[in-house]
Image (spheres, rainbow, N blue to C red):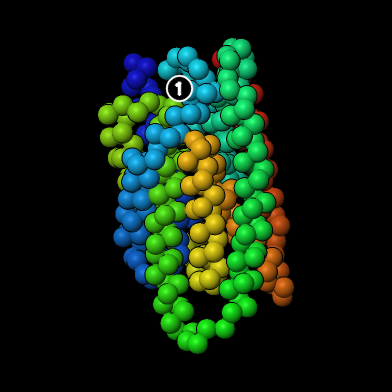
Amino acid sequence: MIHTLSTLLLFIALAFIAGNNLAACVGTVSGSGMLKQRTASLFGASGFLIGLLIQGSQMRKITTLLLPGASQGMLDIVLASTIMIFFIAYIIRTPVPLTMALTGGALGIAVALHLHYDASYVNSIIFMWFLSPILAISASFAAVKLISASRPRSIWRRVSIYKTLLFVVSFLSAYVLGANTMGTVLAFAGFSTINIIAAAIAIFAGSLFLSSGSLRRISQEMYAMRYSSAFSTLSISVILVEVATLFGIPLSNTQAVASSVFGAGITQRHRYLSLRPFLLIVLGWIVASSASFAITYLIR
């Protein structure tokens, strides 16, 4: 019964992660017409799954170091509370990073049950959460400035090169999200054969049936960006999330992308830049981890 519940929670979480994050990964290649919407969905889903299968197991650290000796029932409580927070945020249209909610929930149970969790690992996670937005904003700002200052001999050749690079980096963006975020979810449910199969089905189901609205909307917004800006923001977010994955640290792809977009946006001197969307995302980061910690601490 416990294993069935874990698989069900895994399926729900990954389906909605795929549906909600697909557009941020492949929105540019869809909006530019390089791929049709359905093809872009399959393209992104393939990236999710390949990342999960190749590097997802590196995210086991979050359960082994934060919840040593925890039962599957405890892990399911964390997963269930995170899904609940995710649904509430979805209803009120506030972006919530699932990785942060999972980490907060795991820490809540660890503290409540006085488990001997690895404090240095927790410090590394917190450090990365604060460092990554700073790095993303700074790197994106510098990259866009540098690219804008260069004068190509052929505009059309540069556009063609950026289209190719965007195609590659879009796939990599999906790959690192699959490895980090989806790998973190699978770490809580367990890396069993049945769970991996359920994860694959959930990824493609979410990408194909839960992403159409956001893919249309966000693809238009991302396509409105210059190719150079879109390439810079995606590339920087890919690098940050991949580095975090190598160390087994959960890092929100939303956090990295949003920070990179903000960094690219402030290079536009004559363009009005609204801080409200970015501040809402930051608020979501704080609320997600804090609320999840409180819930699991109380219902442990």
- Relative to 103, say whether 177 is above or below: below
Mark 1: amino acid: Asp
Residue that sits furthest to the bottom in the current view: 153
Residue sitting nearer the eye, 143 or 33: 143
**Element marked by disc 1:** helix
Indicate the position of residue 258 as horizontal and vertical percent values.
59, 54
Which residue sits at x=43%, y=59%? 170
Which residue sits at x=44%, y=47%? 176
Can residue 210 be seen here? The reply is no
Indicate the position of residue 96 as horizontal and vertical percent values.
57, 41
Which quarter shows the C terminus?
A: top right
**Residue 9 in which image quadrant:** top left
Residue sitting nearer the eye, 268 or 91: 268
- Relative to 294, say whether 256 is above or below: below
- Relative to 232, say whether 58 is above or below: above
Which residue sits at x=70%, y=55%? 276
Indicate the position of residue 23 as horizontal and vertical percent values.
45, 56
Can residue 131 be seen here? The reply is yes
Mark 1 sits on what residue? 76
Indicate the position of residue 163 as horizontal and vertical percent values.
42, 71
Relative to residue 209, is residue 284 drawn left or right?
right
Question: Label 1: how many residues lie within 10 Å, few (<14), some (14-19) or many (20+)?
Answer: many
Which residue sits at x=42%, y=74%? 161
Which quarter shows the N terminus?
A: top left
- Relative to 77, say whether 55 is above or below: below
